[in-house]
Every structure is written in C-alpha cells, then in structure tokens.
C-alpha cells in the first residue's frame, strides 16, 4: 500500500465519469428495491436521494443517513456508494436514506467546488446555492436519524481517519470503523490531523457549531437531524480502489454495529 506522491497543493489523482457512475447507481438502486427521490437540479444533473425502508421495524431499528460526492475531487465516495448498492449487504433492521452525489458538476471539472466555484460543504449555515437549499428542504422533510455517515477524502492525509461529532456521548462507532478499515488501508495515526487533536485515527472535536460562521453538512445534521455523525476520510494519495475499499469497509462496520 504505497502512496502515489501525486497530490501537491491539491488532488491530482484518478478521475471518474460521473455520468456513468450515476447511471450505474440508479440501476443498482432499482435492482435492489430502493426508491429514488429527486430533490433538486445542478446544471444538467438531477440531485437525488435513494430510500430503503427497514425490512423489520422494532426497538432495534435504526434510521441511518448516508451522503457523499459533495466535493468533486473526491471520487472514492460515489464509487463506494455504487459498490455498497451493488453488494446490497444492508442489515434488515436499518432504515436508510442515501444521497450518493451532492455535487456532480464538481466531478466533471475534477475540483472541490461546484460549477459556480462554491465549496458546497461550507454552505449549510446560511445557504447561498440552489443545490444546498434544495438539499436542506429535502432533509427537513425526513425524520430524525439515529446516525449519519458522510463519505469524504483528504488529499493531505497519511491514511484513513474518522471525524466524529458525538456531543451527547453515545457509544462510539468510530473505533469499529477504524479497526475494520485497517486491513485494507493505512490509518492516519498522526497526533494532529487538520490541525485538531487525533487519537488512533479518530478526531473527536470539542466544538460548538453555533460559533462557526460556515457549516459543513455534518454540522447542519448534528444541529437539526441527528446527535451522532461520523465523517469518513479516505487518503487521496493512495490508489482509488484502495480508497473505495476503505470507505466501504468503514460503512459496513458501522451498519453491522
């Protein structure tokens, strides 16, 4: 598992055909009984979510929200979404909402921002873009989630890590995810990641989202839709298949728990 050494000042690795990936995502969802809900438009692309109710509803049923593809230079996320949908290993007692690509135009340009040059993952507190406004309107129509998973990449990272928001101290799933990912991807064991204290590949920030002027999706979710959220960060300076494997392993570990 060697680093590519390509990423200097930004992401310069493999790209994906987002048109083909989204076509295959929709096909996999349809094949396995997911419902598609269109909630917005971004250029020529529909913004959509996939919905899969739990097979069994009881006191163990968990409502889980997943999203990815908000940064167009992080191709492992939509590919991981496709793999997860194709493999169809979802636990029967999990109620699922899945947004598999929140910024398709970014992927056509291979850049973090949308076609208008806006980082959508900083637009959730006072939304200025049509796509995030539409996404928030859709989220507001959904129930409270037990847990959310946001799939990302970090081009500066030395390995996989998890950014966990858990202000009420619920039992953490971050350690399970790191343990599951370790056999397929290096873990970033740095004591500081993104300028924040980290331990064994996990960041548990002690922060108040209300004090931050710009919100990523995870902040909006923790303030409005869930009290436990994990952002999974795959290391962009490793091969694309390895990064996809890391995100898939992390999601599966969280769902199995």
Image (cartoon, rainbow, N blue to C red):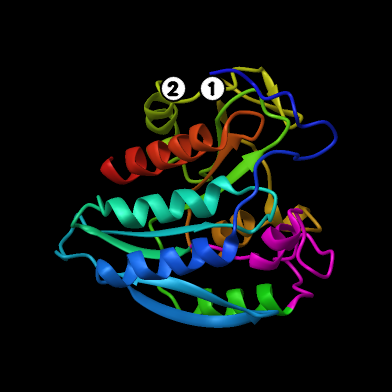
Q: Residue at x 25, y 66 (%)?
A: 32
Q: Can residue 172 be seen in this view?
A: no
State left or right for residue 90 relative to residue 231: left
Q: Is the magenta stretch mostly helix, strand or loop?
A: loop
Residue at left offset 83%, top offset 31%: 8
Q: Classify mark 1: residues with Cα within 10 Å, few (<14), some (14-19) or many (20+).
A: many
Q: Is residue 51 visible?
A: yes
Q: Where is residue 88 in the image (x, y as percent from the top left)?
A: 26, 54
Which is more toward the observer, 154 or 194?
A: 154
Q: Residue 54's spot in the image, x, y percent?
A: 22, 65
Q: Position of residue 46 (x, y in %)?
A: 57, 79
The circle drawn on residue 169 is none
Structural distance between the alpha carbons of marks 2 and 1? 6 Å
Whether the residues at callouts 2 and 1 have beta carbons within 8 Å, the answer is yes
Neighbor class of circle 2 (other Cα within 10 Å; few <14, some 14-19, many 20+) is some
In this view, the residue in front, 123 or 184, is 184
Residue at 64 percent across and 36 percent down: it is: 205
Mark number, residue 187: 1
* Residue 22 picture location, percent across and down: 50, 66
Q: Is residue 218 magenta?
A: no
Front residue of 186 and 188:
186
Counting residues from the start of the chain, the first of labels 2 and 1 encountered is 2
Query: What is the quadrant of residue 191 in the picture?
Result: top right
The segment highlighted magenta reads 100-129
Label 2, on which residue? Answer: 182
Classify 246 as above or below 19. Answer: above
Residue 205 vertical position relative to residue 16 in the rendered view, above or below: above
Q: Is label 2 in a helix, a strand or a loop?
A: loop
Q: Is residue 111 magenta?
A: yes
């Amino acid at each position: 598992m060697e680093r590519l050494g390509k990423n200097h000042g930004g992401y310069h690795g493999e790209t994906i055909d987002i048109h083909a990936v989204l076509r295959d995502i929709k096909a996999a969802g349809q094949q396995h009984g997911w419902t598609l809900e269109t909630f917005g438009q971004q250029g020529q692309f529909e913004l959509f979510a996939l919905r899969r109710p739990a097979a069994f509803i009881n006191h163990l049923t968990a409502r889980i929200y997943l999203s990815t593809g908000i940064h167009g230079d992080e191709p492992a996320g939509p590919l991981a979404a496709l793999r997860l949908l194709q493999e169809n290993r979802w636990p029967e007692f999990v109620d699922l909402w899945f947004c598999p690509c929140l910024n398709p135009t970014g992927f056509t340009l291979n850049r973090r921002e949308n076609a208008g040059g806006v980082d959508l993952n900083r637009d959730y507190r006072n939304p200025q873009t049509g796509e995030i406004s539409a996404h928030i309107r859709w989220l507001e129509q959904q129930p409270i989630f037990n847990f959310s998973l946001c799939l990302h990449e970090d081009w500066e990272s030395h390995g996989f890590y998890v950014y966990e928001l858990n202000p009420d101290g619920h039992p953490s799933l971050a350690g399970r995810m790191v343990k599951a990912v370790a056999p397929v991807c290096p873990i970033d064991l740095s004591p500081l990641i993104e300028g924040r204290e980290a331990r064994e590949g996990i960041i548990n920030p002690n922060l108040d989202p209300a004090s931050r002027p710009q919100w990523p999706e995870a902040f909006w979710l923790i303030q409005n839709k869930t009290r436990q959220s994990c952002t999974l960060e795959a290391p962009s300076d490793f091969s694309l298949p390895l990064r996809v494997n890391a995100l898939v392993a992390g999601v599966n570990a969280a769902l199995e728990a």
